[in-house]
Image (cartoon, rainbow, N blue to C red):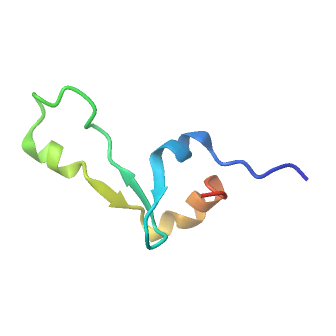
Amino acid sequence: MPKMKSHSGAKKRFRKTGSGQLAFKRRGRSHLLQQKSKRQKRLNRTVVANTRDLNRLQALLPNL
């Protein structure tokens, strides 16, 4: 039986919180921040993944 491998793209984007939920950062906060609106910058905070997506995410991240 082969090893279970995590999806390398998902590994870089998701992390587990202290309560065991999956959290991620939204896109758009790495560069060119001077011209982006305050609203755009404010909306990019760490967010907990939706409960509907957990089955799919756990298939991508079995070892997380």
The outermost residue toward the right is 1
| Left or right for 37, reference 47 | left
On screen, 1 above or below 55? above
Residue at 55 percent of width and 46 percent of height: 11
| Left or right for 31, reference 42 | right
Residue nearest the viewer, comparing 13 with 36? 13
The outermost residue toward the bottom is 19
Looking at the rendering, which quadrant does residue 46 occupy? bottom left
Residue 49 pos. (x, y %): 42, 62
The outermost residue toward the front is 18
Q: How many marks?
A: 0
| Left or right for 40, reference 62 | left
Residue 51 pos. (x, y %): 46, 70
Residue nearest the viewer, comparing 63 with 43? 63
Residue 28 pos. (x, y %): 27, 37
Residue 34 pos. (x, y %): 10, 28
Looking at the rendering, which quadrant does residue 48 occupy? bottom left
Residue at 76 percent of width and 52 percent of height: 4
On screen, 61 above or below 29? below
Quarter of the C terminus within the rendering: bottom right
Residue at 59 percent of width and 66 percent of height: 55
Residue at 50 percent of width and 63 percent of height: 53
